[in-house]
């Protein structure tokens, strides 16, 4: 008898069934509207199936126990051919949202990734990282250039994710010495790098937004006072452009407008490079007192403010209703540090850290949607931000970064073909294992939730409108439940 647990789809299954996990001894059916319960019961008997559960509130859905030594695929075919069901499908398995085994994540210290309300925070005041990791964890083909104080490239949580020059294996460029040794003598660059891409699920320290990524070190800030000059920044920016970087993390700012730096970023824009800029830590309105590169008027720049574990704007974060794009966690953050190969620092705060969360997100986005332009990728991230009262009027989106929403495809609603006497049917497509809500209205003055379900591994589910034929006409829409 097949195991009552989960099983891989049988080799004999039809190609319409994707290779995913489901129970080998059960299936689910939705009776077709108007079908005689007696006719369905007789078919169950003929098939030797047993009704384990019936959901009257869901239109009579049934969970069927299959006889021994049979396959789910064969029974789905039999029931669909019977004409008695609207659909039949496997009893798919689901998984809890991915949680890496890194100690700082497990302890709750990395609240920006997953906030359960620990340490006085507000539950879900985070970027929904575990839910996002259910979609994607790796951006191993995406290079993120960290223009900063360098990176400790031998750190236990960073070494595996460091970019290597194809000729000499070096991790980047040091504009201060003109060498390929971007050693971090300050720690800021290593701190930022860990948030972007500390190796995830390796049982060590922390985890970055992207578990796998290529971190390119661009050392353009000194180790005494974290001062950097435009000539060195531009040198590292050009190095990044010439060597395939897709994202530049710019966790720095200044008040002077530079034509040289602006033009260098515009050149990077032509190469499709996204530059993520920290808004700065002056508690200032950048609409009134701009800082750069955050405020250059270029569509490849994303400016980031910092939020707390309570989904409030951090008290020292700069802001701007038009000049800052969105916010991300940046208060009381833990990450990798440069003092030794196993050192971690925290809690520390700053928009530098918030920018790093966004850079890590963009890395996963580029891996998820490789054919899209930088404008399309940026639009996805900004559209997916969680709108918060505390950020209204403080940034253009009024929202805080949400990885899960950004990585998820749009919800699509389509009408299925039916006969003249058959009930109206819809298909919701939104990517695999995604909870969606169907809402209806009769006059567009108010929407009511009528059905909630999770898409299959194939990325969709179907809905049958069981309203009587003489009921008022209804209009439908579908949204992601997240």
Image (spheres, rainbow, N blue to C red):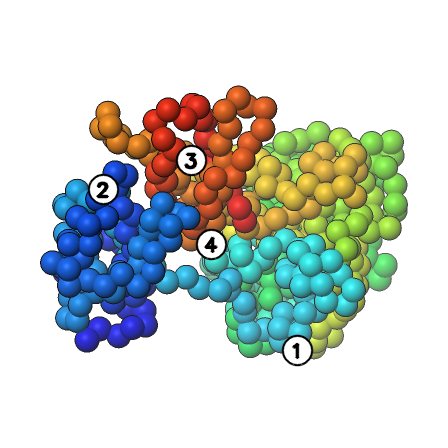
Residue bearing the label numbered 4: 135
Residue 448 visible here: yes
Label 4–label 3 contact, CB within 8 A: no
Give the labeled residue for mark 2.
35
Q: Residues within 10 Å of mark 1 (few under 14, many from 20)?
A: some
For the residues labelled 3 and 1, the Cα–Cα distance comes to 46 Å
Q: Which residue is mark 3?
A: 412
Q: CA distance from mark 1 to mark 4?
A: 29 Å
| Residue depth check, mark 4 versus mark 2: number of the one nearer the observer | 2
Q: Residue at the spot x=34%, y=56% of the render?
A: 54
Return the residue nearer the eye: 270 or 134. 134
As measured in the structure, the alpha-carbon distance from the residue carrying label 2 to the one carrying label 1 is 66 Å
Q: Position of residue 181 (x, y in %)?
A: 64, 64
Where in the figure is residue 399, as x and y percent of width and height? 69, 42
Q: Nearer the viewer, residue 382 or 251?
A: 382
Q: Position of residue 101 (x, y in %)?
A: 55, 74
On the image, which quarter does residue 32 sit in? Answer: top left
Evaluate if marks 4 and 2 touch, with contact meaning CB atoms under 8 Å apart.
no
Q: Secondary structure at mark 2?
A: loop
Disc 4 to disc 2, C-alpha distance: 39 Å
| Vertical order, 20 against 258 (above or below) | below
């Amino acid at each position: 008898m097949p195991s009552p647990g989960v099983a891989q789809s049988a080799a004999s299954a039809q190609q319409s069934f994707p290779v995913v996990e489901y129970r080998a001894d059960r299936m689910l059916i939705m009776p077709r509207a108007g079908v005689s319960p007696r006719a369905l019961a007789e078919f169950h008997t003929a098939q030797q199936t047993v009704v384990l559960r019936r959901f009257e509130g869901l239109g009579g859905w049934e969970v069927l126990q299959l006889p021994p030594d049979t396959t789910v695929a064969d029974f789905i075919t039999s029931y669909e051919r019977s004409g008695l069901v609207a659909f039949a499908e496997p009893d798919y398995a689901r998984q809890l949202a991915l949680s890496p085994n890194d100690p700082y994540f497990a302890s709750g210290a990395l609240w920006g990734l997953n906030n359960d309300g620990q340490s006085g925070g507000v539950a879900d005041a985070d970027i929904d990282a575990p839910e996002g990791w259910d979609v994607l964890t790796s951006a191993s083909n995406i290079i993120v250039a960290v223009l900063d104080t360098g990176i400790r490239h031998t750190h236990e949580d960073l070494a595996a994710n460091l970019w290597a020059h194809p000729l000499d294996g070096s991790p980047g460029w040091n504009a201060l010495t003109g060498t390929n040794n971007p050693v971090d003598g300050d720690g800021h660059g290593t701190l930022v790098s860990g948030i972007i891409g500390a190796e995830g699920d390796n049982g060590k320290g922390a985890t970055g937004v992207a578990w796998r990524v290529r971190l390119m070190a661009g050392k353009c800030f000194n180790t005494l006072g974290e001062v950097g000059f435009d000539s060195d920044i531009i040198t590292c920016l050009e190095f990044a452009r010439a060597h395939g970087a897709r994202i530049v993390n710019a966790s720095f700012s200044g008040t002077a407008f530079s034509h040289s730096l602006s033009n260098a970023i515009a050149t990077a824009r032509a190469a499709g490079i996204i530059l993520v800029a920290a808004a700065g830590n002056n508690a200032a309105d950048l609409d009134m007192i701009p800082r750069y590169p955050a405020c250059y008027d270029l569509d490849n720049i994303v400016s980031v403010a910092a939020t707390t574990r309570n989904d409030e704007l951090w008290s020292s974060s700069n802001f701007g209703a038009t000049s800052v794009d969105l916010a991300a966690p940046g208060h009381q953050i833990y990450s990798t540090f440069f003092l030794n190969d196993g050192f971690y620092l925290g809690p520390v705060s700053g928009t530098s850290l918030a920018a790093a969360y966004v850079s890590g997100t963009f890395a996963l986005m580029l891996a998820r949607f490789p054919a899209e332009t930088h404008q399309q990728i940026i639009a996805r991230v900004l559209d997916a931000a969680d709108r918060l009262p505390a950020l209204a009027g403080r940034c253009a989106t009024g929202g805080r970064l949400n990885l899960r929403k950004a990585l998820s495809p749009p919800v699509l609603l389509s009408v299925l073909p039916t006969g003249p006497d058959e009930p109206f049917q819809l298909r919701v497509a939104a990517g695999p294992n995604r909870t969606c809500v169907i809402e209806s209205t009769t006059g567009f003055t108010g929407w009511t939730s009528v059905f909630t379900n999770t898409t299959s591994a194939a990325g969709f589910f179907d809905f049958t409108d069981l309203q009587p034929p003489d009921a008022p006409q209804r209009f439908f829409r579908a949204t992601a439940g997240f």
